[in-house]
Image: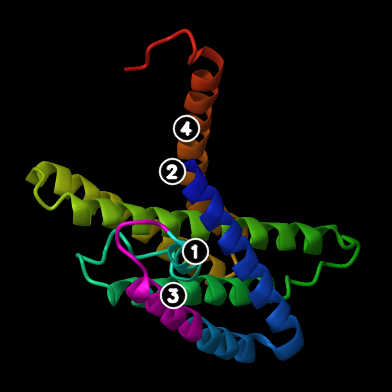
Amino acid sequence: MIFSLVQRAILILLAVMAVWGLGLFLGGGMALAVWAAVGAIACCAGTLLLWTSATDKVTWKNRLAGCLIPWGGRLNGGRLWPIPVISWLVWMAIAAATVWLMLASPAEPEVGQGDGVKTADRIAHILLLVAWIVDGSTIVYVLGTLSQAGAGSSSHRNTLLKTVAIIFAIIVGSVILHGVGATRLALTVAGTPPLIVGGGFGLFLAAVLVFGRKVRWN
């Protein structure tokens, strides 16, 4: 699980850097168009690799396909086509957020404030992008859990649905706030939940690493 998280984090970072670079040379709109075409080709290639790979062992085809279409495997319902479709939509969502946040020019600082305000705004944009990616990834994960928990209790399903609704509302609210110019408030809304959850998980992981050899956590 940790390897999968690290792998996807690296893929997202590479995607953000690629879209950012395209945007600097081609402009935001053209960067999105190029990314959409490249993403479609990559997803089709990943689908072909999965379709032609052996099912009883992991080969280079499976590993490469996992890099091209890393999302949707828990939402496919046993079918192949939802994986590239979901992966392409995720790639495009990352690209759109990158163009909006990374390529947008922060507001010009007022007279006498210097470049510090502009730098702070740029940092807020980057952190907001990270928060959106974490929140969006959480939605995909919870939906995958919900798909695999079809035979679970109704209370369990309702809890997962409420979680998705809350996170979606957080993303929408932060998008609206950023759209009206309240970027730092949008960052607070989008970034606080993953910060709290991630901090708690980090403390638990640290406790396991420190005391795991002497304590039976089961």
Label pair 4/1, CB-CB below 8 angstroms: no
Foreground mark, 3 or 4, reads: 3
Position of 100 with respect to 149 (left or right) is: right
In the displayed structure, would residue 55 be above or below residue 32? above
Quote the CA–CA distance across marks 1 and 3.
11 Å
Foreground mark, 1 or 2, reads: 1
Please tell me whether mark 2 sits on a helix, a strand or a loop. loop
Check disc 3 and report the residue beneath it.
46
Residue that appears at 63% across and 55% down: 127
In the displayed structure, would residue 166 be above or below residue 24? above
Check disc 1 and report the residue beneath it.
60
Snapshot quadrant of residue 80:
bottom left
Q: Majority secondary structure of the magenta segment? A: helix
Label pair 3/4, CB-CB below 8 angstroms: no
Position of 81 with respect to 40 (left or right) is: left
Instruction: Tell me which amino acid carries mark 2.
Output: Met
Residue that appears at 48% across and 45% down: 194
In the displayed structure, would residue 174 be above or below residue 199? below
Q: Few, some or many C-alpha atoms within 10 Å of disc 2 (few <14, some 14-19, many ≥20)?
A: few
Quote the CA–CA distance across marks 4 and 2.
14 Å
Snapshot quadrant of residue 185:
bottom right
Instruction: Tell me which amino acid carries mark 1.
Output: Trp
Please tell me whether mark 1 sits on a helix, a strand or a loop. helix
Instruction: Tell me which amino acid carries mark 4.
Output: Phe
Q: How many marks?
A: 4
Check disc 2 and report the residue beneath it.
1
Check disc 4 and report the residue beneath it.
201
